[in-house]
Amino acid sequence: MNRIAGVFVLLVVMYVALLASTPPDIWYSNLIDLANRQGLWGVMTLGVAVLIVAGGIDLSIGSVIGLSAVAFGLLMEAGYHPLLSLAATLGIGVLIGLAHGLLVTKLRLQPFIVTLCGLFVYRGLSRYVATGAVGLERIKKARPASAGVIDQLQYALVGESPAGLQFPAMFAVMLVLAAVLGLVLHKTVYGRYWYAIGYNEQAARYSGIAVDRQRIAVFVISSTCAALCGVLWLLSKSDANPESAGASYELYAITGAVLGGCSLRGGEGTALGMVLGAMVLPLLQKLVVFLGIGDAILPTVIGLTLLAGVMVDEALRGGTRLSGLFARLRPKGSGPGG
Amino acid sequence: MSSPPLLEATGVRKQFPGVLALDTVSLRLGRGEVLAVVGENGAGKSTLMKVVAGLYTPDAGTVLLDGRPVAFATPAEAMSAGVSLIHQELNLAENLSVLDNLFLGREATFGGPFRFLNRGAMRGKGADLVRRVGLPPALLDAAVGSLPPGQKQLVEIARALGLDARVLIMDEPTSSLTQTETDRLYTVIDGLKADGVAVLYISHRLAEVKRCADRVMVLRDGRNAGELAKADVTHDNIVRLMVGRDLKQFFPRDHRHGAGAAVLSVEGLRYANGPELPASFEVRAGEVLGMAGLVGAGRTELAEAVFGVRPVVAGTVRVGGETVTIRRPADVIAHGLLLAPEDRRLHGLVLERGVDFNLSLPNLDRLNRAGWVDRIAERELANSSIARLRVKTPNAAKPVGQLSGGNQQKVVFGKWLARGPRVLVLDEPTRGVDVGAKAEIYALIDELAGRGVAVWMISSDMEELLGMSDRVLVLPAGGVAGELRRGGGLTEEAVMRLATGGSA
């Protein structure tokens, strides 16, 4: 609970700073745009966070986003109905997750390694299947019959009409996903299994739980969320570059999950925390731009925020080296950097 | 005026979260003396040794070495002062050679700050050290990982001798040794004694305590329970001090009334990476079958294979006459065969979560209402289990990791009791459990057996095996070496003879 309160306070401070640094007449459009981006990041963060709760990790998310954004576009360009293309793209995510899960459980490979390989494999595949960027304009031109459905999808999932961004639909998508995953995590038998496996896989196994099946399921959730994120990517940005779409987003997703209270050791995290954690980085991004700090330094800011976050968290938990360190520092009262 | 004892500890107190491990414990150890420290699991033996060796800082009390107070902050400090602890789990780098291990952290070097290894110098000293423990110098280049357990133990002792150890602390040194290796260890201890080295010897094998100790000190629930001079060291004297009560009451048989039909039949069972020799045995309704054997004889592995955690490669397992196809624990759990694993912290419990969470874990199929966890049924399960087993916890949500060992073990039992077991496999059911909780667990085992549950109890605790079992099977290294029946030659000596490869 501490962790959630901490992230919440951080968010409030950052929102206030953002509003203070922008003129009131762009508040509304700025916040909608931000919420939409938070929704996009939230979808991938929720997926990997559930996997992390069950003790896994997924480094392939960024490449899955790239591959699915490209695949979604190419399928539509090839003349498949946009909804069928969407379903097929999510299917790719399911298959990827299934492959990861099977490799991890049946061949006993480490999740880190398996998904690291995936990171390369899917990036290469998206570069191979698409020569150059895939764009909605080109698709609409090639398939005029699909243009109407694509516009409707864009409106429903992104909140964008030809007149511009109307409402943060991707934020809503994230909230729906969070509600569903939250119910599963906190109220159902499956969520119980995942927490148990994340904390102590052996104890779960010895309790008669079909551990392998559950571990495969969470890999599928992670990859499918990444695939959904790829669909949203193409719809919201109107084009996807096979080289760069989603590149290094796996790290943003993991960062969001950790900020939201997930422990990489597994077993910890709440749906609410995951949502709040996912909201931090896009906000930070905006803030850096509007405070005039400059986009160049952004990765450093992200890194330091995460570091500060986990240090404060460790200290709050107490009983760690870090809290001892803080305790030692306090009475001396000497400033840092001596 | 007599000179002060080599080592003296007075009023040592050590508190862990939820447990008072040591409560004003004292001990004295003279030069060239072998003092055996015995006690039930959880009596505080290991904690006391770790305090003496500098692994733990006591909350109160003093440790005097040569009459001067010492407070070792690290094991390294203790070692350089001449106090070395030989661990139960050996602390050797398995991938390095014997020589490298002997000098690990205090290598002879040359070249000033470049610290090149001076292997020549180390080799010479190393050869002397291994000779003192009766090992051939040719062994210096062998990788420690390739040595049998007995030789590893001797390498650890040699390393301690290299540090001019004056006090050697051995924590259950023979728990994984064969009879020959044990005999050799006794010889080495006799030699050390003659050199004036004092030995603190932790053991719960009373036969071995009689063999090598000059004095026996008994701990019970973190307190000094008494001391016995060599002449008074008898089995009954020690056990009475250890459990502090009448033995009949401690190991109850009030509910049991004879064994019924076989509930679990294991025939020709072999498991992956296990011994060639297949194991066959039966556990009958209403009996407690004890299973003895050396550490590493494969008792735990056998139980794991039957429980579906370890792949079975040959043989059949029948529960209640029905052949069970074992692929995963759920297969045997469905037949009512349940395992309370040896390592409850690793395999039995999710330590970070509450008592209720853990109790629900194997019962979620019953708490499942169309995928949702039935919170009301869950709370009832938690409350009734806590009440029935008398788990001492402030509330059902308390993380089990913060409970005492005895209460943790009760939770492990509680996980399964709700399912109405037919066969209960108990692997070291009272390891790390205080005497009070132990008595409760024994009473529970007796009650379950009385209700017709077939209990298969794996134990390294000789008193427990002899006290609780109706029959004892001894596992040498796979297979089954022999069977001893209550009232038919079931003694500590007979069990050890079978376990170490002798005949019944």
Image (cartoon, coloured by chain):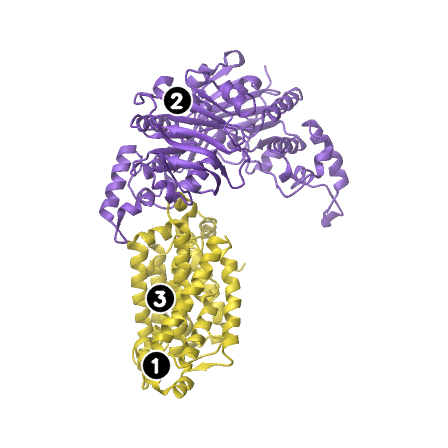
Chain colours: A yellow, B purple
Q: Where is residue A163 in the image (x, y as percent from the top left)?
A: 31, 86
Q: Can residue A280 be seen in this view?
A: no
Q: How far apart are marks 1 and 3 (CA)?
A: 34 Å
Mark 1 or mark 3: name the one nearer the start of the chain: 3
Q: Position of residue B219 (x, y in %)?
A: 45, 23
Quickly name the residue at label 3: A11
Q: Can residue A170 be seen in this view?
A: yes
Mark 3, chain letter? Answer: A
**Foreground tag (2 vs 1):** 2
**Judging from the image, what secondary structure is the residue with disc 3 in?**
helix
Query: Is the residue at mark 1 from the same chain as the one at mark 3?
Result: yes
Residue toward you, A280 or B411: B411
Quickly name the residue at label 2: B470
Q: Is residue B159 above or below residue A140?
A: above
Quickly name the residue at label 1: A150
**Foreground tag (1 vs 3):** 1
